[in-house]
Image (tube, rainbow, N blue to C red):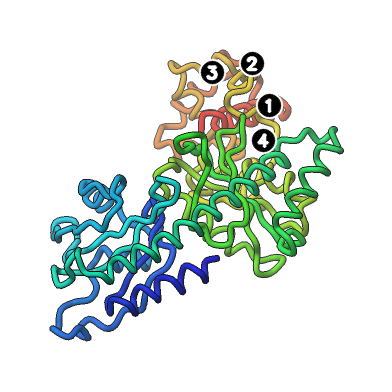
Amino acid sequence: MREDYQVLIDEVTALLGTPATLENRDFGLIAFGAHEGEDDGEDGALLMDPVRTRSILRRRSTARVRAWFESFGITRAVEPVRIPPDPSAGVLRGRICVPVRHGGVVLGYIWLLDDGALELSDPRLADVQAVARRIGSLLADESRAGARRGGLLCALLTAAPGHRAAVDLAEAELAGELGPVAAGPLAVVAVVPWEEAEGGSAAAPGIPGAVAVCAVPGTGGLAVLVRLRTPGGLDPARTAAERLLRSPRARAAAGTGEPCTGLGGVPGAWRQALAAARAARAESRFGPVARWDRIGPYRLLALLARPSGSSAAGAPDPSVRALLEPGHREMARTAEAFLDCAGQAGRTAALLGVHRQTLYYRLSRVEQLTGLDLDDGEDRLLLHMALKTARLLRG
């Protein structure tokens, strides 16, 4: 279908003799016509400006540029709209925006660089509007198909493992929608937290390699099923994650699970990706996109920790509850640093920038608050796990 969009935009470019671009309603780039060099215009004018260059290279416009364009009413328009330059926003050239609509809803925009040479009454714009209607029909079809695949992916990820019939049914129906792609290799990307669009839609258009997308209830996260080029290569998954983190609805971090062959491994890969994303939120050194196989002890902790929103979320072990109170944050930080440094006082004091005697005093306070003995291996393990899990849940 992406090839269909490119053919249609090439048709517009040839019709008007000026490069056209197609973006979805979130200003994500879908297709663009051929652009000549800087001085190849007949009048020597620049054919490109910073906004169009950024849109093509990064496949998305900035919030400021989006606000400027939307201030001309393009979200409600049914006819082409002329937009003047705004050098302060990087819009050096004027544009004509042709809304792409279907069923009374704007689904995208065709953009034409123009500094007033093309009249809005030009009959060729009527032809461009006809192309826009064809594109709108394609986008609507793609949206409906995406919604079906997203719903089936959600059913697969939320089906209780013990309900084998429900799992098998969701897997079979999703395989029917995906066709040969379902055989893999595949990867799952998680983004947490993810703010759903109006109407509960998890739509995240323009994600490279994505074959199904859904918000997963109870996790606050978005799941993206990505087709991989090779069984062991996660590059497409990372690219998809990075694109998602540039979305207005993503506010934190992403994670990727291990690659899987076929849909049977997708639920497990989702749990891994969600754990990695939570680890990336808890520890900046992992993020913003964390891989499951590189988050160390958080592989265990993230899978054991209850997700935010569950009844037991945020309930630490009773022995460390007092240490985790807001008034004892310095003590908790000291204890975590001490345990991260394998109990070496010299390293810990240097890391915290305190005198050893100050460190020893703080550690004694930690023992008083928790009732744990920092010379005991099991007590240290309990405290370390409790502190890391609390960090994970706070993220």
Question: How far apart in space, not on screen, are marks 4 and 1 (Cα)?
Answer: 12 Å
- Which residue type does callout 4 highlight? Leu
Disc 4 marks which residue? 301
Q: Which of the labelled discs sits on residue 245, or is there none?
A: none
Q: Residue at x 43, y 16 (%)?
A: 327
Q: First in sequence: mark 3 or mark 4?
A: 4
**Label 1: few (<14), some (14–19) or many (≥20) C-alpha neighbours in 10 Å:** some
Q: Quadrant of the N terminus?
A: bottom right
- Asked if the residues shown at circle 4 and circle 2 are in contact, with their CB atoms under 8 angstroms apart, the answer is no
Disc 1 marks which residue? 382
Which of the two discs, 3 and 4, sits closer to the camera?
4
Q: Could you say whether the residue bearing mark 1 is in a helix, strand or loop? A: helix
Q: Residue at x 81, y 37 (%)?
A: 166
Q: Nearer the viewer, residue 173 or 90?
A: 173
- Asked if the residues shown at circle 1 and circle 2 are in contact, with their CB atoms under 8 angstroms apart, the answer is yes
Image coords of residue 13 (percent x, y): 34, 76
Residue 162 occupies quadrant:
top right
Question: How far apart in space, not on screen, are marks 1 and 2 (Cα)?
Answer: 9 Å
